Image (cartoon, coloured by chain):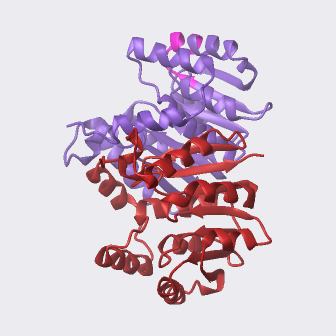
Chain colours: A red, B purple
Amino acid sequence: MKTLIASPEIERYIQNLYPVEDPTLSEMGELGEKTNFPIVGPLVGRLLYQLTKLTRAKNVFEMGSGFGYSALWFALALPEDGVIHLTDQSTKNSELAKRFFLQANLAHKARFHVGDSLEILSKMRENFDIIFIDIEKELYPKALDLAKSKVNVGGLLIADNLLWFGQVLEKHGDASTEAIKEFNQKLFNDCNFISTLHPVRDGVGVAYKIA
Amino acid sequence: MKTLIASPEIERYIQNLYPVEDPTLSEMGELGEKTNFPIVGPLVGRLLYQLTKLTRAKNVFEMGSGFGYSALWFALALPEDGVIHLTDQSTKNSELAKRFFLQANLAHKARFHVGDSLEILSKMRENFDIIFIDIEKELYPKALDLAKSKVNVGGLLIADNLLWFGQVLEKHGDASTEAIKEFNQKLFNDCNFISTLHPVRDGVGVAYKIA
């Protein structure tokens, strides 16, 4: 059963407080709505933006980029020589993301990868200041094991959908729900991270790597 | 009219994920419940803890400390030579806070002030890495003006009760509600800060000073 996380009126109030966003982001938001494609939305977007600035991150790896909505928020926050890696299974999504990044004059910060994000991340030689997890939910526990080792100490592991529209409250959920519950147990019991779970939109986990 | 911010079941789920807290914090939580004294609670407490670690803050100024619940979270996160200034109008609250800080072996990080927190802050010679606002709501706009100038660039201004139990949605609220609405408009329109509002408990604002 799906449960409301935060009141929609409250989320609207918060969104109205936030500054007018980049026009490309608004266009992407409209596309997401029109095509019913899940994007993190402006409240989570601004959180990603703030966290990137706050930690002075220089490189970001996204596991699951869709058409690049969250990636654009990261890119806006990165310094001029910062880099964000976008990954997606779909060539069409990747091409769309490229177009949006060009339109927003942020293509110089982006690297586009098509394929399995776990495989792509495992082949990266470098580690990252931020890794963002937003792939198929059944893959979350596996993604966590990999991402943990590929994030720098002092960096952040961020994951979306950790409340899974309230389904994490179910005792015996479907495969996606159980995978997210497992992910949460693993992450919040890991003493190499100081982690919080923000009840914004569908639940955003922010894990700060301390060792 | 009061509106629920986030679902209580969801907040309970998140709290259960978090590590077992310091026993003094639990004792303070019980005292808050028994005496109906408002404290920020473990979800907000852990956010304060994480933000203090993340920004490597060395000094914190609290406007409105009550008996020290949020201050103890800050103190736990501060380095050994870090300092937190607690302020409260009530000598009784300040004495209680002292007792709890001694019990938790954190008194060496604490400075206790009794009196008007605005006056105390305005007399401080130094600036702070974090300023936390949790005083009478009608004083919030005035507190913001002062706190803005007393927080370091790269530091955080954090404020509790920014959703005021949903009353910020009212067109014409009482004096406290209108003061918080004014505070929010001022803070989120200030381009010297990158700000977010977390819909956790009663709404926590986190403003990162960039200039």
**Location of residue A104 with respect to B196 vertically, above or below:** below
Q: In the image, is residue B93 part of the stretch drawn in magenta? A: yes
**Quarter-of-image position of residue B70:** top right
Comparing A71 with A21, the one in front is A71
Comparing B82 with A107, the one in front is A107
Q: Residue at x 42, y 33 (%)?
A: B12
**Location of residue B159 with respect to A85 vertically, above or below:** above
Q: In this image, A124 relative to A158: left or right?
A: right
Which percent across, then down, holds residue B206?
Answer: 52, 48
Which percent across, then down, holds residue A89?
Answer: 53, 78
Q: In this image, A192 relative to B31: left or right?
A: right
**Quarter-of-image position of residue B180:** top left
**Location of residue B189 with respect to A28 vertically, above or below:** above
Comparing A209 with A169, the one in front is A169
Q: In this image, B173 relative to A33: left or right?
A: left
The magenta-colored residue range is: B87-95
Q: Residue at x 63, y 10 (%)?
A: B99
**Quarter-of-image position of residue B150:** top right
Q: In the image, is residue A152 part of the stretch drawn in magenta? A: no
Please say whether residue A102 is visible from this viewpoint: yes
Which percent across, then down, holds residue A154?
Answer: 74, 53
Q: Residue at x 61, y 17 (%)?
A: B24
Please say whether residue B187 is visible from this viewpoint: no
Which percent across, then down, holds residue A2?
Answer: 30, 49
Q: How many marks?
A: 0
